[in-house]
């Protein structure tokens, strides 16, 4: 379902669920001025279309022992498309990598890595990242303090298809 097919109620449902995915259907229906059945149909339609991809618990990284966040820029050798694909496949399976993006600029990929400590990152860097297929350069940027995490998508301002 393209974003242009979302009406104001769909957008309100999505905004509310981004803020609190634990809302009951009755609570959600009340907040969007629908009865529970049509509200649930809309939520199910949004889920079936893939706009709602899942529901997750937001964890405190330090609370679970992941003290260090590192943004890692990686260049890969462009000579072999097979190596770039092998790199992508390998990164997807690394639990320390919480996000990975193909980017333009100085790096080819930007990874967000979370680990317990600097020593753990050093071990991950030397034992895993440097051994990934096609890696030619790695630049690490250490997060000092989060300014904004887990932002919600700006649905109200997105009227393009």
Image (cartoon, rainbow, N blue to C red):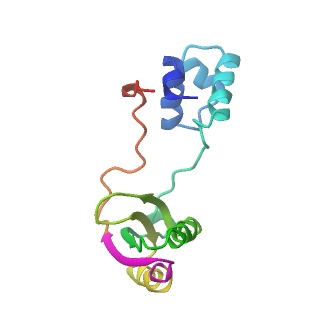
Instruction: Indicate yes or no whether the magenta region holds residue 137.
Output: yes
Pick out the residue farthest to the front.
Answer: 79
Give me the residue at 71% from left, 18% from top: 37
The part of the chain drawn in magenta is: 129-141
Where is residue 131? Give x, y as percent: 49, 83
Q: In which quarter of the image is residue 54?
A: top right
Numbered disc total: 0
Q: Nearer the viewer, residue 14 or 86?
A: 86
Above or below, 107 against 7 in this view is below
Above or below, 73 against 49 in this view is below
Give me the residue at 35% from left, 77% from top: 137
Where is residue 68? Give x, y as percent: 39, 70
Where is residue 133? Give x, y as percent: 51, 78
Q: Nearer the viewer, residue 18 or 81?
A: 81
* Quadrant housing the C terminus: top left
Instruction: Indicate yes or no whether the magenta region holds residue 132.
Output: yes
Where is residue 3? Give x, y as percent: 50, 28
């Amino acid at each position: 379902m393209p974003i242009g097919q979302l009406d104001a109620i769909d957008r309100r449902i999505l905004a509310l669920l981004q803020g609190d995915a634990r809302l009951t259907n009755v609570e959600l229906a009340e907040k969007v001025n629908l009865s529970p059945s049509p509200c649930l149909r809309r939520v199910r339609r949004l889920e079936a279309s893939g706009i709602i991809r899942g529901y997750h618990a937001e964890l405190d990284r330090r609370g679970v022992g992941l003290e260090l966040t590192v943004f890692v820029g990686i260049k890969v050798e462009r000579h072999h498309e097979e190596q770039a694909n092998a790199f992508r496949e390998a990164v997807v399976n690394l639990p320390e990598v919480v996000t990975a993006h193909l980017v333009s600029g100085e790096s080819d990929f930007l990874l967000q890595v979370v680990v317990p400590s600097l020593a753990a990152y050093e071990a991950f860097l030397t034992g895993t990242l440097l051994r990934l297929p096609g890696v030619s350069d790695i630049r690490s940027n250490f997060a000092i303090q989060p300014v904004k995490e887990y932002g919600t998508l700006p649905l109200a301002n997105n009227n393009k298809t």
